[in-house]
Amino acid sequence: MNIFKIVQVILCLLLITSCVSKKKVAYFQNLENQKSLPNNIEIQPDDLLTIRVSAPEQEAALPFNLTKTVGGGGNMGNANVELETYMVSNDGTIEFPVIGTVEVQGYTSIELASKIKELVSPYVKDPIVNVRILNFKISVLGEVRSPGLYKVEDDYISLPQALSMAGDIMISGKRKNVLVMREGKNGEKRHAYLDLTDANVINSPFYNLQQNDVVYVEPTGAAKQGAGYLGTVSRYLGVASVAISLVLLFTN
């Protein structure tokens, strides 16, 4: 009976050491009515844009919709026609048909669509303008299930959404110290450490991600230690097996 009690104690100790406090893993604790910052990203140099101008009289809008032929391998029957793209220059401008140079840096997609709508109104009656950023990408690294480079289809993404795309933070990752690295205007590097267990995290300017942001989830102290000399659950079981064998050896 003493042997079984010792075994039970060992197993309980293993379970206790494997348990993680809710305060360490639960997101957005003490969440109340929170108001987040605006989430639409601003257009930056080197962004790749598509701009579509539509109107009841579509022929009037045609000069503003430059197109290009892609695919087909020389066979026009298999080729596709797509809207021409606009690369934002280092000075934050693009060259738009008929209008000429348009300053776009610092505008959101919605704001730029409104601006271009005003610019083309003298030429097109009741225009509708749609702007998209094509090369909005982020990197998620560290203790997530699927680290990698991710393309964002919308014009905004929050940090939790990015982590969700990467399969969420593993139990071995720090939720209180998630690093977001960002390249700002004029190439300056900025970063912030965000605590995802705190509901006030949504007030951080780094909560909503921007183009080319890098998210890094650091391993916990236990994970770092485990990488050094324990590593896997099988090793814990191995330790327990050795302990049980020693108990049996000395009690016989």
Image (cartoon, grey):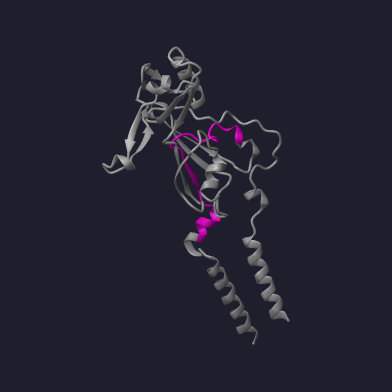
Kindly tell me whether residue 117 is visible in this rendering. Answer: yes
In the image, farthest residue toward the top: 122
Q: Is residue 211 magenta?
A: yes
Q: Does 21 appear above or below 213? A: below
Location of residue 42 in the rendering, given as x and y in whole percent from the top left corner: 48, 27
In the image, farthest residue toward the left: 74
Q: Does 161 appear above or below 229? A: above
- The residue closer to the viewer here, 47 or 63, is 63
- The quadrant in which residue 16 appears is bottom right
- The quadrant in which residue 195 appears is top right
Q: Residue at x 52, y 65 (%)?
A: 232
Q: Residue at x 48, y 22 (%)?
A: 55
- The residue closer to the viewer here, 59 or 99, is 59
Q: Is residue 30 magenta?
A: no
* Quadrant assignment for the C terminus: bottom right
Location of residue 112 in the rendering, given as x and y in whole percent from the top left corner: 47, 22
Q: With 152 as the anchor, is 11 left or right in this view?
A: right
Task: Report the magenta residues as a range.
Answer: 202-226
Q: Does 234 appear above or below 91? A: below
Q: Residue at x 55, y 43 (%)?
A: 177
